[in-house]
Amino acid sequence: MKKFKRIVIVVIDSVGVGSMPDAAKYNDDGANTLANTAKAVGGLNLPTLQSLGIGNLTNVKGVPPTSKHPASYAAKLLEASNGKDTMTGHWEMMGILTTSPFITFTETGFPQELIDELEEKTGYKVIGNKATSGTEILKELGEEQMRDNSIIVYTSADSVLQIAAHEKVTGLQELYRVCEIAREICMKPEYLVGRIIARPYIGTSKDNFARTPNRHDLALSPPKDTAMNLLEKSGFTVSCIGKIADIFNNSGVTKTVKSKSNIEGMNKTINELKEATYEGIIFTNLVEFDSEYGHRRDPKGYANALETFDKQLKDLIEVSSKDDLIIVTADHGNDPTWHGTDHTREMVPFIAYSKRFKNGTTLENRTAFADIGATILANFSIKMAPHMIGTPVLEILEDK
């Protein structure tokens, strides 16, 4: 018998809670996104998360541990996969172990051979070719791109190749065509990039350039079925809010809801849960923690985003019923006080809340993000595929 009719997974993108045991291999030993953000701003005010036990997971200034949180279970999840990128983290949540990290080009930009092939096959000159902010590179190169009708290529700490071009100069469909060619080139094993992203923009000068909502992602599909695929095949709804559908290349997705910000993503999650009559999952990613504050090393902005989320989490809890389970987690770290602009190899929080829980407590560390997917499948009485990893959190399923 199904315990919960709906399970909401909210990924507070990059909110890690302490460096992994192997973090030194990634030059990340000592990173702690949540704790170091709190320390940098003199303390955080997170009454909702504090009441659910997040202060029990790491030392968060302003968010003390709580001895009793009977309506929630709290734990730290260790990442079993190699890497610290978006796709690796999300895929592992849904049962996929990644042994070889996706290739990133953060430090050096893309190889000249790749750029040469892209120019030859598209007919466009490439400018940029470095890791940078998408808004900053428009200020730097947008006017040149318009003048010459070239294409701006750039990357980030994720395994992505992003191409920016003006919607009126280059044209939206032409940009999409160029990205299709880039996707084909980047299927080669030496370049195997997780996502190609079309980044169209409008405006007349560096003073008013703005990216449009016509972003288009061309992602790799997970190599085998995920928990989402198994849910879909069993007739359950898999409603994805934010960039989740892009991360899984729409595999196992039955409904997609786009969002432009953390606030909008949470509002849409709240409305989705409030109105949902189906059985299945609502899977939400709140990307601004990562894209706007982590990569830009902005602890103040990160702190403000956390405090805003905490208020919206309270609203989500209020509209939930005893048939609903809410899970708050993350996909990696991105400590805004750390060196460089890369993600950080960290454990992530696991906070599970339901109005029917009576015995909530703080659990021992779990050995895989995939315990989330395993718990979801167990809840809906779906057998895990042989290739999948993860162990159900039985305390959640047995709390009556």
Image: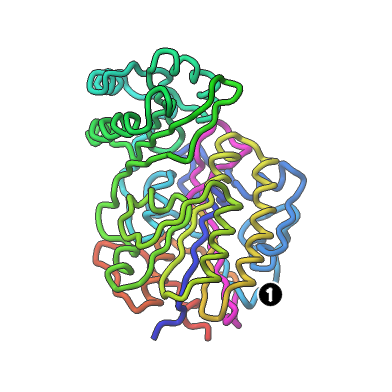
User: Is 295 placed left or right of 162 in the picture?
Assistant: right
Against 146, is 19 above or below? below
Question: Which quarter of the figure has residue 149?
Answer: top left
Against 249, is 53 above or below? below
x 39%, y 34%: residue? 198
Give 287 or 274, whichever is nearer the viewer. Answer: 274
x 57%, y 72%: residue? 353
Q: x%, y% of residue 2? A: 41, 82
Q: Is residue 261 visible?
A: yes
Against 355, is 21 above or below? above
Q: x%, y% of residue 187? A: 24, 36
Question: As shown in the figure, which amino acid type bears the numbered disc 1?
Answer: Lys
Q: Secondary structure at mark 1?
A: loop
Q: Which residues are magenta?
A: 331-360
Q: Is residue 241 magenta?
A: no
Give 135 or 29, whichever is nearer the viewer. Answer: 135
Residue underneath mark 1: 68
Most common SS among magenta residues: loop
Question: Which quarter of the figure has residue 42?
Answer: top right
Mark 1 neighbour class, 10 Å CA radius: few under 14, some 14 to 19, many 20 or more: some
As drawn, the residue found furthest toward the front would be 168
Q: Is residue 364 visible?
A: no
Against 63, is 84 above or below? above
Q: x%, y% of residue 262? A: 58, 50
x 35%, y 52%: residue? 248
Q: Is residue 344 magenta?
A: yes
x 39%, y 53%: residue? 245
Quarter of the image containing the N terminus? Answer: bottom left
Count of residue discs: 1
